[in-house]
Image (cartoon, rainbow, N blue to C red):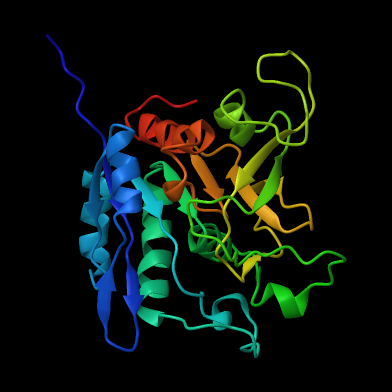
Amino acid sequence: MNHKKKPLIGLTSSHNVHTDEVSLTPYCPRAILAAGGIPVILPLEASEEDLKRLVTELDGFLFTGGPDPHPFLFGEETHAGCGDASVKRDRMELTLLKLVMEQQKPIMGICRGIQIINVGLGGTIYQDIPSQTERAFPIAHRQPFPHRVPSHTVQITPGSLLERICRGESETPDGGDAPGSGRTSPLILRVNSTHHQAVRDAAPGLSVCAYAPDGIIEGAVMEGYPYLVAVQWHPEYLWEDDPAAAGLFRAFVAASGGDLP
């Protein structure tokens, strides 16, 4: 019997610039395992040559959450509201992104992931949402609840790849059309939120396809690329209870195994 090999998924890790420790919470690896992949934690200080070999050997790449990208990467001075940054991690992830895209391997981004992908492709980010945006109702993008508890909604653009992944697998808390109804009302997801930065100007080639009610960009895909899906929220904390979050990991792992949507 021919058994298809599980895809090998490379995950970036976080870097504490004060202790020089590298770490990764277990939630992303667990989500990858549950979706049928094998998580592989990527080394922070690998050379470009080593990263090139890893990109060749592995099947998909998840850019995980973490601290702020350095403002110099997108041509700005450091805003007073900007948080900690790791130059080592920025350098590694931007090199990795270039190599992965050269080999056309599937990409997923979460939180910082969508931001560093956007910066790497020529876009900009808000360094601090509360002080750089005017919002009639300031949504708690740094939510007061535990990560597993949703705090705000996100509207997904009809017809987008992100909608195709999530459609029919999420509640519609605004009373919209039920999955499978055949109607075309936007898909509304309940998501968690643990960030103070976000995509500001989308990079060329990225298609924004999800927004929070206050207009903050929450998701993007790259049309014409084999598979690139990035979201601002943290589905790794939600997938056990939210089929739409689980679907994000299943679609990514499936694409990494050659089953492109």
Pick whichever, 18 or 256, lies toward us: 18
Give the x, y percent position of residue 125.
65, 69
Residue at 30 percent of width and 63 percent of height: 24
**Given the current orientation, which residue lies at the most extreme left position?**
1
Query: Could one spot residue 205 in this view of the protein?
Result: no
In the displayed structure, 50 sits above or below 80; it is above
Residue sticking out furthest to the right = 136
Above or below residue 129? Residue 205 is above
Rendered image quadrant of residue 175: top right
Asked whether, in this view, residue 182 is left or right of residue 199, the answer is right
The foreground one among 162 and 92 is 162
In the rendered image, residue 192, in percent from the top left (x then y), is placed at: 57, 53
Residue occupying image coordinates x 69% and y 55%: 217
Q: Quadrant of residue 97?
A: bottom left
Pinpoint residue 159: horizontal percent, then vertical percent: 70, 28
Q: Position of residue 148 (x, y in %)?
A: 48, 51
Position of residue 8 in the picture relative to residue 184 (left or right): left
- Is 37 placed left or right of 164 in the picture? left
Image quadrant in which the N terminus is located: top left
